[in-house]
Amino acid sequence: MEYNAKIVNRLKRSDGQLHGVLKMIEEEKDCTAIVTQLSAVRSSLDRAISLIVAENLVECVQENIKEGTSEEESIQQAINLLMKSR
């Protein structure tokens, strides 16, 4: 699978946000601010997951079929992957 720069940049941004949260905790910042930042990290990771699934879904289904997985089972696996990303 190919992970493009857009996905890598999004994950680097999430990593930076998470480091910021750790610093906030070390500095004993207000819990509301920490939870707000953690929510932003979660949203950023959710978007990264969605991008990875969307950009690689067809390739994953085709690869599964080549490896002998039935088309129906491969589609079900894809649906399960989409559901996990929500």
Image: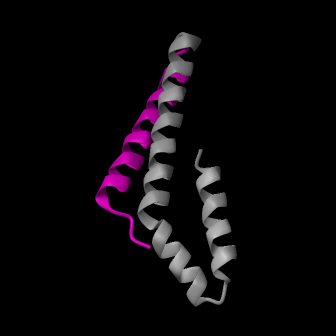
Residue 80: quarter of image: bottom right
- Residue 57 placed where, x, y %? 49, 66
Question: How many discs mark residues in the rendered view?
Answer: 0
From which residue to which does the magenta span run?
1-28
- Residue 67 placed where, x, y %? 61, 89
- Residue 2 placed where, x, y %? 39, 70
Left or right position of 32 against 73: left
- Front residue of 58/6: it is 58
State whether residue 48 is above or below residue 78: above
- Front residue of 26/71: it is 71
- Residue 27 placed where, x, y %? 50, 17
* Residue at the farthest front position: 72
Left or right position of 83 against 61: right
Give the residue displayed 49% in from the left and 35% down from the top. Answer: 43
Give the residue displayed 55% in from the left and 75% down from the top. Answer: 61
Applied colour scheme: one colour
Magenta span contains residue 22: yes
State whether residue 56 is above or below residue 23: below
- Front residue of 52/35: it is 52
Give the residue displayed 62% in from the left and 70% down from the top. Answer: 75
In which quadrant is the N terminus drawn? bottom left
Give the residue displayed 67% in from the left and 84% down from the top. Answer: 69
In which quadrant is the C terminus drawn? top right
Residue 16: quarter of image: top left
Magenta span contains residue 60: no
* Residue at the farthest left position: 5
Residue 15: quarter of image: top left
Q: Main secondary structure of the magenta part?
A: helix
